[in-house]
């Protein structure tokens, strides 16, 4: 088992800057835009992008994390009690253009759960998806709008994301498990 | 491991009880955040079959089922119709044919849930049967005690009131003795059942003896018809000699909690001062009841073969 | 009339049990001897089998007229002979109540038509078993009644019972008293004690039975009349009877197999087949009942055969009917529990199940003797079998003994010299 670092902290920082610009560019500005991160690493991505947009464009977008525990599709088959918290974003999603953020996109299941969670809070105009890394392996018809890095992986490979807020430093690595 | 049904705590093990309480911790956490849309029982049906009036137990079960995503059906039947109408077994066959997954039954006669359980494929939960058992009430009582004290070992529980007709007292006694708590009971001799000592209760000779050093003081509801039946002379005499007031609580542990399965007759079993004191857990018990019933329904359905529906 | 010769069997006499042959002729026992021969007689080879006087049950419910869905005289008689009984006395709680000569006459006629065992009706003490006014005991006696009882609906009024004891004695009949103080029963369904508390079922205190036994003893003693106490189930009841008998009170008493073969642990599964009145009691009562049978305080064993329809038992315990269908299991249970259990000798068992009941009601039979009616029962005491209610002749399959292993199987039942049952 060995890990190969694909992105170091400066690479992650550059990528997030690019993604921030892409978001504003694609939306032709920041009107009605808001950011929602899938807890817990997606929330960090959202917060970073939010701060960068404010820095470059001077607009402080509404930004919050969302808990998808209650919307997981394995609650019935897996039969466990989720450790979930109630979703209170602090802003309305109705009519908004939402950029849903996550660190790694794989099967698409958490994105599906997050979309369901968002729709329980209101009806947005549009939901886009931003991910730091797309490792492939989709099990849902989910496609990202903003991609930090494409990393095609096999079933035996795992993407490890580390963030300064949690692990003390930023990095993105790939591990092969036999 | 819990089986198909929960008919009483006499047949439940300490492991079963603790499993339900542990699961209820997660359920309560969700509930306190007002998260009431779990998908676990989606596509399942929970029927409450009540042959006795009840607001809180039925409501508690129904909400528990709904919070878990189950469909619920309520059937009420006055006890008089039990004697004329369809037999319980036939009602069971009917509910089974309609693909119910869980039937919660309350019945004025002991053993009715056992009879039903023998004849249906659905899981049967005893929501109170005559003078026999009321296991979910006892489970929520245990939850409330554990939340406060952390463990049951050496816990002193005093139960005062109509022990003879109380399914709550019996389920508490069966469970608490298995969990390592001590139960002392006190009641007028006319409301004290035979052989209760052999079931593990310490039968106190006075109210003070029952309360001495108690960590938990539990009052039981006195049914008005007991007085009409001549089992004690008047409510005021009952409250004077068998009720619990702030004065009496001084005999209990200073850190004790007060519980009551409800609904309370204020000034009879407990004085209002006791009911409304900060150490009274009577309202908390209601919330815990929903969490415990969610946990129970969840575990019963989960334990069915691979969580299969009634097919 | 045909002759029947029973060869090579072991006969149970009042004072001894020995190998002998019995010749039955014209409805009587004609000859008893070490080796009896008779040309032209039908022969039963009873080698290895025991011959008892035909069993007599003075407490059964045949349900006819009125409740034929539970049992009728034909099915009840068939069940009786299958259980080794040659004479049975049926209680009057039918519909209409057997409180007049017409119903008594109907039962006698119907039983003759069925022609299996001898059926003696017991008339009601009070009209409609309502406890209010005496039934026509004289006319019932003339129509064939052998005793009076308000079984199932005890006479609660002491004065009425007193009058009944007095009046019945004018016609040479005795009152059979079902002892139960309804106010103490208070809706109970099982014995009051540890198990009733455990099961959460309302208890019937022993006092409900004992208070009434005491009343009947005092009445009989005061009046100098004979009273018979039905289905004694408690230790205290046995003690009251023992003391009364020691004082010389003319009181006799019966018990049933379920009071010495079961304890109330059986109620814990809520099986309504264990619901019976009086209720099944505790171990110390069982011991006292056995002691009472041993020392004669309890004169006889009856069945209180109380057949019910399946639907009356497939309900909540509280709602189920009281009663056990017991006539087909009585002998095996008594033999297994009492003889193999060391309580009674074979001779005593024959007395408790045949001789004593005959004597209490003044019925012919009950003993193996030359000149006595040729009513007898032949059993294989070594045969072990499992009770199967599905095989009962009775319509009532309500027994708590289903699946129980017992010894002593009835092989032949002979009434007036004719084989009425053959296994």
Image (cartoon, coloured by chain):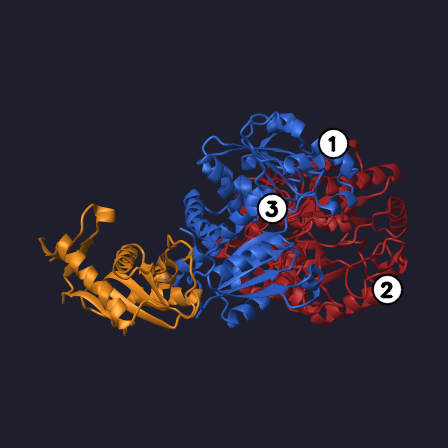
What's the residue at 59%, 57% (across, down)?
A: B58
What's the residue at 70%, 64% (across, down)?
A: B81
Disc number lying in front (1 or 2): 1
Most extreme residue toward the front, as rendered? A58
Q: In which quarter of the image is residue A140?
A: bottom left
What's the residue at 55%, 31% (across, down)?
A: B256
What's the residue at 21%, 60% (across, down)?
A: A16
Q: Where is residue B189 in the image (x, y as percent from the top left)?
A: 70, 34
User: For the residue labelled by badge 1, is the local secondary structure a helix, a strand or a loop?
Assistant: helix
Most extreme residue toward the bottom, as rendered? A141
Q: How far apart are the alpha carbons under marks 1 and 2? A: 61 Å
Q: How far apart are the alpha carbons under marks 3 and 1? A: 24 Å
Sequence-earlier tag: 3 or 1: 3
Residue at the spot of label 3: B167
- In the rendered image, the quadrant that contains the N terminus of chain C is bottom right
In this orientation, does residue C378 appear?
no
Q: How far apart are the alpha carbons under marks 3 and 2? A: 51 Å
Is disc 3 in the same subunit as disc 2?
no
Marks 3,2: beta carbons within 8 A: no
Residue at the spot of label 1: B240
Q: Where is residue C388 in the image (x, y as percent from the top left)?
A: 52, 61
Chain A display color: orange
**Residue C101 numbered tag:** 2
């Amino acid at each position: 088992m060995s890990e190969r670092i694909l992105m170091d902290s400066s690479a992650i920082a550059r990528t997030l800057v690019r993604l921030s610009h892409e978001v504003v560019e694609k939306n032709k500005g920041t009107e009605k835009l808001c950011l929602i991160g899938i807890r817990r690493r997606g929330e960090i991505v959202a917060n970073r992008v939010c701060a960068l947009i404010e820095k470059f464009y001077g607009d402080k977008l509404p930004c919050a994390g969302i808990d998808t525990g209650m919307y997981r599709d394995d609650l019935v088959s897996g039969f466990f009690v989720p450790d979930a918290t109630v979703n209170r974003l602090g802003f309305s999603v109705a009519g908004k253009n939402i950029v849903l953020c996550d660190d790694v996109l794989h099967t698409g299941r958490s994105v599906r759960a997050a979309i369901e969670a968002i729709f329980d809070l209101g009806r947005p105009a549009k939901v886009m998806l931003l991910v730091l890394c797309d490792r492939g392996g989709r099990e849902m018809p989910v496609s990202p709008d903003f991609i930090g890095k494409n990393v095609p992986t096999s079933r035996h490979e795992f993407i490890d994301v580390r963030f300064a807020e949690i692990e003390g430093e930023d990095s993105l690595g790939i591990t092969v498990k036999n | 491991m819990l089986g198909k049904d929960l008919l009483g705590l006499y047949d439940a093990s300490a492991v079963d009880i603790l499993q339900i309480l542990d699961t209820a911790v997660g359920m309560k956490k969700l509930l306190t955040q007002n998260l009431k849309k779990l998908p676990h029982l989606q596509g399942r049906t929970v029927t409450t079959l009540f042959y006795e009036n009840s607001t809180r137990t039925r409501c508690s079960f129904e909400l528990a089922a709904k919070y878990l995503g189950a469909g619920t059906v309520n059937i009420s039947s006055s006890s008089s119709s039990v004697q004329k109408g369809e037999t319980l077994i036939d009602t069971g066959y009917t509910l089974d044919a309609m693909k119910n997954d869980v039937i919660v039954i309350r019945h004025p006669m002991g053993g009715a849930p056992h009879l039903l359980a023998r004849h249906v494929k659905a899981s049967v939960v005893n929501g109170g049967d005559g003078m026999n058992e009321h296991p979910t009430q006892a489970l929520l009582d245990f939850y409330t005690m554990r939340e406060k004290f952390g463990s049951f070992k050496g816990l002193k529980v005093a139960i005062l009131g109509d022990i003879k007709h109380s399914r709550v007292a019996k389920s508490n006694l069966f469970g608490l003795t298995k969990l390592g708590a001590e139960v002392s009971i006190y009641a007028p001799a006319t409301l004290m059942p035979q052989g209760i000592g052999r079931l593990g209760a310490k039968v106190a000779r006075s109210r003070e003896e029952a309360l001495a050093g108690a960590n938990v003081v539990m009052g039981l509801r006195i049914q008005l018809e007991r007085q009409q039946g001549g089992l004690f002379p008047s409510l005021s005499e009952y409250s004077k000699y068998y009720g619990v007031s702030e004065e009496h609580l001084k005999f209990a542990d200073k850190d004790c909690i007060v519980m009551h399965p409800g609904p309370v007759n204020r000034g009879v079993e407990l004085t209002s001062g006791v009911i409304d004191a900060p150490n009274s857990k009577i309202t908390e018990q209601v919330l815990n009841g929903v969490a415990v019933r969610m946990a129970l329904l969840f575990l019963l359905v989960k334990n069915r073969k691979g969580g299969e529906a009634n097919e | 009339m045909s002759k029947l010769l029973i060869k090579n069997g072991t006969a149970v006499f009042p004072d001894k049990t020995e190998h002998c042959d019995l010749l039955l002729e014209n409805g009587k026992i004609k000859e008893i001897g070490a080796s009896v021969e008779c040309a032209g007689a039908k022969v039963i080879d009873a080698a290895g089998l025991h011959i008892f006087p035909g069993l007599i049950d003075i407490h059964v419910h045949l349900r006819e007229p009125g409740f034929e869905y539970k049992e009728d005289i034909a099915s009840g008689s068939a069940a009786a002979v299958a259980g080794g009984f040659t004479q049975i006395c049926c209680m009057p709680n039918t519909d209409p109540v057997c409180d007049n000569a017409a119903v008594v006459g109907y039962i006698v006629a119907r039983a003759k038509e069925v022609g299996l065992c001898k059926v003696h009706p017991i008339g009601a003490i009070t009209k409609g078993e309502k406890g209010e006014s005496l039934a026509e005991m004289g006319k019932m006696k003339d129509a064939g009644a052998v005793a009076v009882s308000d079984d199932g609906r005890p006479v609660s009024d002491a004065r009425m019972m007193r009058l009944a004891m007095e009046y019945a004695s004018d016609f040479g009949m005795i009152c059979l008293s079902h002892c139960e103080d309804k106010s103490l029963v208070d809706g109970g369904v099982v014995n009051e004690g540890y198990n009733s508390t455990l099961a959460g079922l309302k208890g019937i205190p022993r006092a409900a039975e004992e208070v009434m036994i005491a009343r009947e003893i005092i009445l009989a003693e005061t009046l100098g009349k004979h009273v018979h106490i039905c289905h004694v189930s408690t230790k205290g009841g046995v003690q009251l009877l023992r003391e009364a008998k020691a004082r010389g009170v003319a009181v006799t008493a019966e018990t049933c197999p379920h009071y010495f073969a079961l304890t109330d642990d059986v109620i814990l599964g809520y099986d309504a087949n264990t619901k019976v009145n009086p209720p099944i009691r505790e171990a110390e009562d069982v011991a006292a009942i056995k002691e009472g049978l041993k020392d004669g305080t309890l004169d006889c064993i009856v069945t209180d055969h109380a057949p019910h329809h399946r639907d009356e038992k497939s309900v909540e315990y509280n709602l189920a009917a009281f009663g056990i269908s017991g006539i087909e299991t009585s002998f095996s249970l008594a033999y297994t529990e009492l003889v193999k259990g060391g309580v009674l000798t074979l001779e005593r068992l024959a007395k408790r199940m045949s001789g004593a009941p005959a004597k209490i009601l003044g019925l012919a039979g009950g003993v193996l003797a030359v000149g006595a009616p040729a009513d007898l029962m032949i059993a294989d005491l070594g045969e072990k079998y499992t009770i199967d209610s599905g095989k009962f002749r009775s319509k009532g399959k309500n027994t708590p003994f289903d699946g129980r292993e017992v010894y002593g199987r009835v092989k032949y039942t002979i009434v007036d010299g004719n084989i009425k049952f053959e296994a």
